[in-house]
Image (spheres, rainbow, N blue to C red):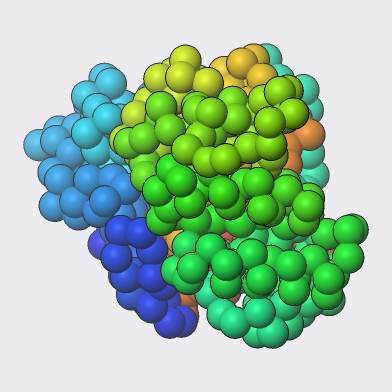
């Protein structure tokens, strides 16, 4: 096993519920052809504190599975706890899966699909555009540009302004692009129960695909109540059918609670699955299959990853049958990258590399 540290800057700071991100740093993970690995494999471990472990914990976990002579312990993957150091496990799991898929002569998506008894993966994946905060005119203009670029699904960040202001922003967007564009609103956990309850009622006429993380990550009971129409809000007396006026998606909650807990709580209509935060492409595809079985739709996204992990996330999404638009069009957020992108986005779709493994030998030059 080999590790190569890296750091890539963002084109501009990205504000999140957990603070500002200015760069992505981590390790490119390589496995060789020794110790029973049939072909070289490349992975990426890019921890994001608040979502995953710290960089030092990630490095320690990865170095802990190596041998003194530079080899890899036979039980290396089992030695990394996905609950404690998910980015480290992602990097090693991806490298091993890339090697295995290349040894089989098929794509990573095909390798993952076969392991989960899923149909032949798709050749491309629908992706959404993301629009940040702004006044109604600026927000509508940004969404119109995304639609002009071929996106038919756009996620708009909300929660930084008053609910009145966000409703006005989303109404301006809907009026600008019409009914043919799927709109998502992402509050990043900014609302309390009363605000979230009012939001889903007031946004219902705008036909949103879903509201993402309307409540703080730990409030699964609140999310379940919101879905069932029991949120802290006033409803019409004759509204007895219950249920949220807008579907509810959970993202940050999955960094605090495991998927089975979220599913058992009936807290989500959609779950946003991040391979880097959940411990690897194999774990995310397994999670997507469990979610579907529970009647919950999976959406695959990155944690603003570099090209190796971003490519892996495209393969994972391709292995999910009839996947909804995913948050994978994030390359433009990086000022530089580790290698050319083998998954170009055009007309709202990300192409899936058809070479063996991640993208044939496209990333072997990183070592």
Tell me, yes or no, if residue 79 can be seen here.
Answer: yes
Residue at 83% across / 71% down in the picture? 175
Q: Residue furthest front?
A: 237
Residue at 89 percent of width and 58 percent of height: 180
Along the viewing direction, whichever of 344 and 5 lies nearer the viewer: 344
Image coordinates for residue 152, horizontal then vertical, percent: 81, 60
Left or right: 116 as drawn, with respect to 87: right
- Would residue 210 be found to the left or right of residue 174 on screen? left
Q: Position of residue 215 (x, y in %)?
A: 43, 44
Q: Quadrant of the N terminus?
A: top left
Q: State whether residue 165 is above or below residue 213.
A: below
In the rendering, at what x and y percent does residue 173 appear? 75, 71
Location of the C terminus (image quadrant): bottom left
Q: Residue at x 24, y 38 (%)?
A: 85
Looking at the picture, tell me which residue is in the foreground, 240 or 53: 240
Q: Residue at (32%, 48%) from the top-left corner?
A: 51
Q: Observer-nearest residue: 334 or 177?
A: 177
Note whether 99 is above or below 133 in the view shown. above
């Amino acid at each position: 096993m080999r590790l190569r540290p890296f750091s890539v800057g963002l084109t501009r700071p990205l504000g999140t519920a957990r603070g500002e991100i200015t760069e992505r740093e981590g390790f490119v993970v390589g496995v060789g052809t020794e110790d029973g690995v049939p072909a070289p494999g490349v992975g990426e471990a890019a921890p994001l504190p608040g979502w995953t472990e710290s960089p030092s914990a990630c490095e320690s976990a990865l170095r802990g599975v190596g041998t003194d002579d530079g080899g890899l312990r036979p039980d290396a993957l089992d030695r990394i706890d996905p609950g404690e150091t998910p980015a480290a496990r992602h990097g090693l799991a991806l490298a091993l899966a890339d090697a295995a898929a290349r040894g089989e002569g098929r794509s990573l998506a095909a390798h993952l699909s076969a392991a989960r008894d899923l149909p032949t993966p798709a050749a491309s994946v629908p992706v959404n555009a993301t629009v940040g905060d702004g006044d109604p005119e600026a927000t509508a203009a940004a969404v119109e540009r995304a639609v002009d670029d071929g996106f038919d699904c756009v996620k708009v960040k909300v929660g930084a302004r008053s609910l009145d202001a966000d409703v006005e922003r989303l109404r301006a967007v809907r009026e600008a692009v019409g009914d043919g564009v799927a709109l998502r609103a992402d509050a990043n956990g900014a609302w309390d129960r009363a605000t979230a309850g009012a939001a889903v009622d007031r946004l219902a006429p705008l036909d949103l695909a879903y509201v993402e993380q309307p409540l703080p990550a730990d409030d699964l009971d609140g999310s379940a109540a919101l879905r069932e129409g029991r949120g802290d809000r006033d409803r019409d007396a004759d509204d007895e059918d219950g249920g949220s006026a807008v579907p509810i998606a959970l993202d940050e909650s999955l960094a605090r609670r495991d998927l089975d807990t979220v599913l058992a709580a009936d807290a989500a209509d959609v779950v946003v699955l991040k391979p880097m935060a959940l411990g690897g492409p194999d774990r995310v595809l397994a999670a997507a299959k469990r979610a579907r079985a529970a009647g919950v739709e999976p959406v695959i996204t990155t944690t603003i990853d570099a090209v190796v992990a971003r490519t892996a996330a495209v393969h994972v999404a391709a292995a999910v049958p009839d996947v909804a638009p995913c948050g994978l069009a994030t390359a433009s957020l990086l000022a530089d990258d580790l290698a050319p992108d083998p998954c170009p986005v055009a007309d709202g779709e990300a192409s899936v590399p058809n070479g063996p493994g991640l993208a044939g030998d496209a990333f072997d030059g990183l070592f």
